[in-house]
Amino acid sequence: MKKLTNALRHSSAGYARRKHRTNTTISNNSDLPRLVVSRSNKHMVWQVVDGNVTLLWIADFSITSGTKTEKAHELGVSIGKKLLDKGISKIVFDRNWYLYHGRVKSLCEWVRSAGVTI
């Protein structure tokens, strides 16, 4: 296990600690594809990546109605269905440094409800 740097020990660099934890989880399950989340203030983009190959890419640009969390709910279900159609039933959730809260949590829960193991 890597020794944490001084910046990772302080609470001002909480995002770095979260990123370190996420990277540890991903490296322990490197044989599985990962669901990568990228979000801005208005939109979210999700990618399913296996190694360096993007298997699936989806964003909420086309949905104009509903709150951000409702958009994540709708697209989480569609991601789950598309993953099962491609024969992928088990993935690793790469939330980067984002907290597991709100839109990120909603997406993950609805992908699970579609039948994909995270």
Image: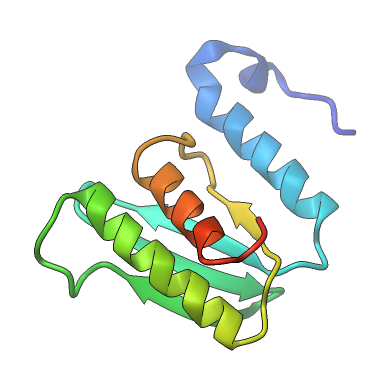
Q: Is residue 3 above or below residue 92?
A: above
Q: Residue furthest left?
A: 65
**Left or right: where does residue 11 sit relative to residue 62?**
right
**Left or right: where does residue 116 sit relative to residue 107?**
right
The answer to which of 35 and 15 lies nearer the viewer is 35
Q: Which residue lies furthest to the bottom in this view?
A: 86
x, y (%) of residue 53? 63, 82
Q: Quadrant of the N terminus?
A: top right
> What residue is drawn where x is 54% and y is 13%?
11
> What residue is drawn where x is 59% and y is 79%?
84
Q: Is residue 25 above or below residue 82?
A: above
> Residue 64's image quarter?
bottom left
The answer to which of 79 and 56 lies nearer the viewer is 79
Q: Residue furthest right?
A: 1
Q: In this view, does 46 lie above or below 78?
A: above
Q: Is residue 74 above or below residue 27?
A: below
